[in-house]
Amino acid sequence: MSQTAFSSLSLKQALQDNLSSLDYHAMTPIQALSLPHIIDGTDVIAKGKTGSGKTAAFGLGVLNKLNTHSFKIQTLILCPTRELADQVAGELRKLGRAIPNIKILTLCGGKPFGTQASSLEHGAHIIVGTPGRIEDHLNRKTLSLASINTLVLDEADRMLDMGFQAQLDKIIGQLPRQRQTLLFSATFTDQIKQIANKVMNKPTSVEAESDHNENTINQVVYELTDEVDRFTATKLILLHYKIESVVIFCATKRETKELAQELNRFGFRALALHGDLEQRDRDQTLLRFANKSTSILVATDVASRGLDIDSVDLIINYHIAHDADVHVHRVGRTGRAGSTGTACTLFDSKEAHKIERLEAFLGHPLKSEKLPNMSVLKQDPIQPTMVTLLIDGGKKQKVRRGDILGALTAKDGVTGSQVGKIDLLDLRSYVAVERLVANKALDKLNNGKLKGKRFRARRL
């Protein structure tokens, strides 16, 4: 039996059967390295990039030890953002669907506190939440952590980057001392080491890369000249590659906003992702990038962590990352799951030593190329193929994806192939449609009905 087969693990039969039904047979490197220790009850520090399969690693361990007959909270999973918490909860429900009566609650900001408190009164097995909202529930005595036997810190470095140290200290201070602690992080900084030393008991450390390798990523560095500034160089690269899905990493929130504005003035479709965004705006930004209705996401490192985006074709490092680990994490956004991607890094003469330091860390030289010819500036920027329509109705109004698709494709409507991703939220829904039929689709939604009711729709 292969040591990387899930069947080699001492998991509950219901979990094994479900893994087979999901066509999960071979473990990813981080799963193979960490799961045996997690199942044995050992504290684990796992370093792995986005896309490495870490959620299933701790998720299977948590589900395997769960006592579903007791409606006490047994596991607390802390995540830096609501998006990641929702992803984790969704994956846990999928992995544990063969085990009856599992109750998983998400406790995050941006959702009504009272509704969450009412759900907690009825008990739960697993809580997935963000530090701020978990702290709120502890302060208001609506949440007790007295029965926790497993703590998971997911994207621990990201939580520290976002300034959650005080909340983490308070939450961990209310947990039983006898517990298993699992810490997952993309990087392993001094702060992470300090947390590990303080809250973990003789942890086992494992490290694995994600499912991409250097052969799938074309890394190129471009040196800026006196004639070409950083913004012009970015335009040249975007026009040269003509790629629909691009993430540009900036060093500061201000730079992120300014670059997105300048790109839009030039005719590109760009959105900024940074820490000053309200949750609703952040949700819309990520959704529009994921459904291909905007081509370029300009982001800070902190704001972009934990994103659930299937494929990014091009990464541009507007500035060299301050840390080599961060550079690898940025670049790892492309060339995933067997696909190929390109990562471009801009630098000036004063930053040449940073390139040398990065090459020493990577163990190989980076390919240096001249910037594309200035003649490409005469070209028009490519436009996204899709447009996002916002509908003022969602899960609370019993709206389903099939209702939206049916309304769009009804008599004289658009075709099913012209409809893209449909996202349902509590009070609103988003649907991506091909740009060429956007007006027609909007007309069908505004003049038709969903669930026998009229809902207002508009174009974002």
Image: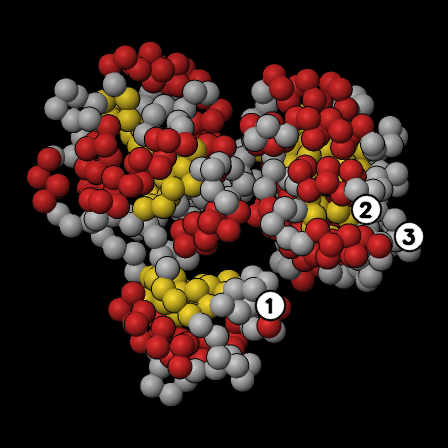
Asked whether disc 2 touches disc 1, contact meaning CB atoms under 8 Å apart, the reply is no
Quadrant position of the C terminus in the picture: bottom left
Query: Percent position (x, y) of residue 274?
Result: 45, 37
Q: Earlier in the sequence, mark 2 or mark 3?
A: 3
Residue at mark 3: 70
How are the residues colored? secondary structure
Q: Earlier in the sequence, mark 3 or mark 1?
A: 3
Residue at mark 1: 395
Q: Amino acid at mark 3?
A: Ser
Q: Quadrant of residue 9?
A: top right
Q: Which label sits in the foreground, 2 or 3?
A: 2
- Left or right of residue 383, residue 455 in this image: right
Q: Amino acid at mark 1?
A: Lys
Residue at mark 2: 142
State the CA–CA distance, disc 2 to disc 1: 26 Å
* As drawn, 144 above or below 406: above
